[in-house]
Image: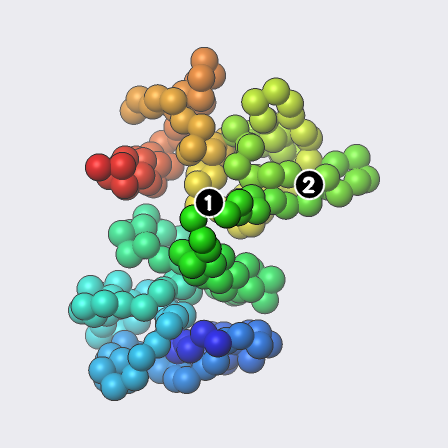
């Protein structure tokens, strides 16, 4: 059982999250607060496993609230603003949900926390099942192992998924498929997303996967370089 609280200044947003939480058997809501100050007082008295946290709130933002906590629990950000996604990387959040939050997207975020906990407790040497999705390809549902993706190319209402020795054309838009992909698949251009595990080199203008050069779009540069710097620091 995962003990969680909701912190959001919007009553309708809190009500929606509370409704989603009630549908998940392994989530237990133990508090719901309209501002970070109330939540801070509660955390001083009670242990929590997970916070569904809004960012833009009066008096104390969600990000400033986290900075004030010595050992914060797991965090799933819930916000109407995309621009905070970059800064959220610093807090190693489980996920970043954009309002309005659908139940399938909510459940995917919570399952990321479960998978993270399973990975930490799994005995060393035990084979872990790789993440995958079933995608629409020529009227069939085709299993795509996410770690095998090299990069994804947008074709308007379709995408072309490139692997080391193969490719698939899927009836899906790039922006929508990104909602269901893990953080290591990173949007770098309006027409491209890449598997960061496959990157062999990068410059200020492009990313290299072997001999292939993929451009970095201007609006994505801050997000891309923040992710790559953070990823590089993990190896130090």
Read off the residue under disc 2: 143
Instruction: Name the residue located 41 percent from the left edge and 76 percent from the top edge.
Output: 4
Closer to the eye: label 2 or 1: 1
Q: Is residue 229 above or below residue 80?
A: above
Residue 157 or residue 112, whichever sits in front: 112
Task: Give the percent coordinates (x, y) of residue 97.
Answer: 46, 60
Residue 80 or residue 188, whichever sits in front: 188
Q: Is residue 51 above or below residue 206?
A: below
Read off the residue under disc 1: 125
Residue 120 visible in this rendered orientation of the protein? yes
Which picture quadrant has residue 167? top right
Q: Is residue 88 above or below residue 173?
A: below
Task: Give the percent coordinates (x, y) of residue 32.
Answer: 40, 83
Instruction: Name the residue located 63 percent from the left edge and 45 percent from the top edge.
Output: 133
For mark 2, does the 10 Å Cα neighbourhood hold few (<14), some (14 to 19), or many (20 or more) residues? few
For mark 1, does the 10 Å Cα neighbourhood hold few (<14), some (14 to 19), or many (20 or more) residues? few
Instruction: Name the residue located 57 percent from the left edge and 47 percent from the top edge.
Output: 129
Residue 109 visible in this rendered orientation of the protein? no
Q: Residue furthest right?
A: 139
Task: Give the percent coordinates (x, y) of residue 76.
Answer: 40, 63
Marks 2 and 1, the one that precedes in the sequence: 1
Q: Is residue 70 above or below residue 162?
A: below
Regarding mark 1 in the picture, which secondary structure is present there? loop
Query: Left or right: 99 with respect to 61?
Result: right
Query: Left or right: 63 with respect to 33?
Result: left
Query: Left or right: 61 with respect to 136?
Result: left
Task: Give the percent coordinates (x, y) of residue 183.
Answer: 44, 45
The quarter of the picture where the C terminus appears is top left
């Amino acid at each position: 059982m995962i003990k969680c609280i909701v912190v959001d200044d919007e009553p309708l947003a809190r009500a929606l999250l509370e409704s989603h939480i009630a549908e998940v058997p392994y989530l237990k809501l133990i508090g719901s607060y309209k501002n970070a100050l109330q939540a801070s007082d509660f955390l001083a008295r009670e242990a929590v496993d997970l916070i569904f946290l809004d960012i833009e709130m009066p008096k104390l933002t969600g990000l400033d609230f986290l900075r004030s906590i010595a050992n914060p629990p797991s965090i799933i950000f819930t916000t109407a603003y995309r621009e905070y996604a970059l800064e959220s990387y610093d807090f190693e959040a489980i996920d970043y949900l954009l309002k309005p939050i659908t139940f399938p997207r909510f459940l995917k975020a919570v399952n990321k926390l479960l998978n993270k906990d399973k990975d930490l407790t799994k005995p060393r040497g035990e084979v872990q099942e790789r993440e995958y999705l079933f995608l629409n390809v020529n009227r069939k549902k085709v299993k795509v192992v996410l770690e095998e993706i090299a990069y994804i190319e947008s074709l308007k209402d379709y995408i072309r998924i490139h692997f080391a020795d193969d490719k698939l054309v899927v009836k899906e838009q790039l922006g929508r498929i990104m909602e269901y992909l893990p953080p290591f698949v990173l949007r770098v251009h309006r027409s491209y997303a890449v598997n960061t595990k496959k990157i062999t080199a990068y410059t200020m203008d492009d990313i290299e996967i072997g001999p292939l050069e993929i451009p970095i779009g201007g609006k994505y540069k801050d997000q891309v370089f923040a992710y790559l710097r953070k990823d590089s620091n993990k190896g130090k």
